[in-house]
Image: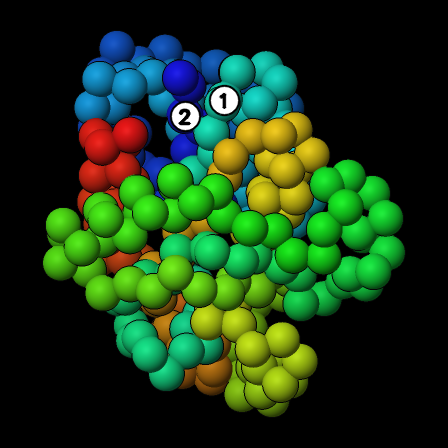
């Protein structure tokens, strides 16, 4: 089994890459891929870049070129749920676009308006969160090609589709994985509340995401160990 592990930002995969052994690197279509061993399992780790197009193309490369048989996407997101807070995690039980015509998308493979996280991978992620003492929910993740950093946009998305968090890649990863019949799960650590304060911290001040990435790395490593 080869596991493809993705992030959108370099910081989201640096700590995972640091844990790999027997590493080889390869650059393809502008992305660097790190193949190695994590907890005795073969993995390919990469930073695909931000947004849906980058996420989709990198997912397909992981599957076609590097033989990934399961995809784990891990990174940060804006919290939309009253059940959790900053530093907690949403495991993608359901992933969907908040900025697309879903009826039209569903006319092509995998013929779904929403994408379901692989049950075994979702459970493995929830178990890894519990083992690491990280509060988590298996919930709804909304994807769109826009950083949500204002209350007005947040409220529109919340009213339209009621997600637990909002981000920029998960549904594209899930859609391409589904087209290929490859199991997939999206993991998101809550870095902000998808409002003006989040924009100030992450965009204006370029706040470090290291602590949130440490949480994600713990969960991904725990999953790989258990799978």
Question: Which quarter of the figure is the N terminus placed in?
Answer: top left
Placement of 141 over or under 24, stated as above or below: below
Q: How far apart are marks 2 and 1 (CA)?
A: 5 Å
Residue 143 lies in quadrant: bottom right
Using a 10 Å C-alpha cutoff, classify the residue at mark 1 as few (fewer than 14 neighbours), some (14 to 19) or many (20 or more).
many
As drawn, 89 above or below 176: below
Query: How many residues crowd around disc 2 within 10 Å: few (fewer than 14), some, or many (20 or more)?
Result: many
Which of the numbered marks, if any, corresponds to residue 3? 2
Q: Residue at 31%, 75% (x, y): give it.
A: 84
Q: Residue furthest front?
A: 119
Q: How is the image coloured?
A: rainbow
Indicate left or right for 161 with 227 as reference.
right
**Tag 1, which secondary structure?**
loop
Please state the horizontal and vertical placement of residue 120, each as a whole percent of the image.
39, 40
> Tag 2's secondary structure?
strand
Q: Where is residue 65 in the image (x, y as percent from the top left)?
A: 59, 15
Residue 172 rendering spot, x and y as whole percentages: 64, 47
Instruction: Left or right? Give the position of 63 relative to 8.
Output: right
Residue 138, quarter of picture: bottom left
Which one is in front, 179 or 99? 179
Which residue is drawn at the image coordinates 77% and 39% (left, top)?
A: 109
Left or right: 34 as drawn, with respect to 26: left
The answer to whether marks 2 and 1 mark residues whose Cβ atoms lie closer than 8 Å is yes
Drawn side of residue 184 relative to residue 206, left or right? right
Residue that carries the numbered disc 1 in the rendered image: 68
């Amino acid at each position: 089994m080869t596991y493809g592990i993705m992030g959108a930002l370099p910081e989201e995969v640096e700590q995972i890459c640091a844990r790999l052994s027997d590493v080889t690197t390869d650059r393809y279509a502008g992305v660097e891929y790190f193949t190695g061993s994590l907890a005795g399992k073969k993995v390919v780790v990469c930073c695909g870049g931000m947004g849906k197009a980058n996420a989709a193309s990198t997912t397909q490369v992981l599957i076609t070129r590097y033989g990934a048989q399961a995809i784990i996407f891990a990174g940060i997101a804006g919290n939309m749920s009253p059940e959790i807070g900053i530093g907690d995690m949403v495991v993608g039980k359901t992933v969907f676009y908040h900025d697309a015509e879903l009826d039209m998308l569903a006319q092509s493979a995998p013929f779904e308006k929403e994408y379901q996280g692989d049950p075994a991978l979702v459970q493995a992620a929830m178990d890894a969160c519990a083992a690491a003492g990280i509060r988590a929910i298996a919930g709804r993740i909304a994807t769109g090609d826009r950083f949500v950093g204002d209350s007005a946009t947040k409220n529109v998305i919340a009213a339209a589709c009621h997600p637990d968090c909002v981000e920029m890649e998960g549904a594209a990863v899930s859609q391409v994985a589904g087209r290929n019949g490859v199991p997939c799960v999206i993991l998101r650590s809550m870095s902000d509340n998808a409002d003006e304060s989040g924009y100030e911290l992450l965009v204006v001040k370029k706040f470090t995401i290291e602590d949130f990435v440490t949480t994600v790395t713990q969960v991904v490593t725990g999953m790989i160990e258990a799978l």
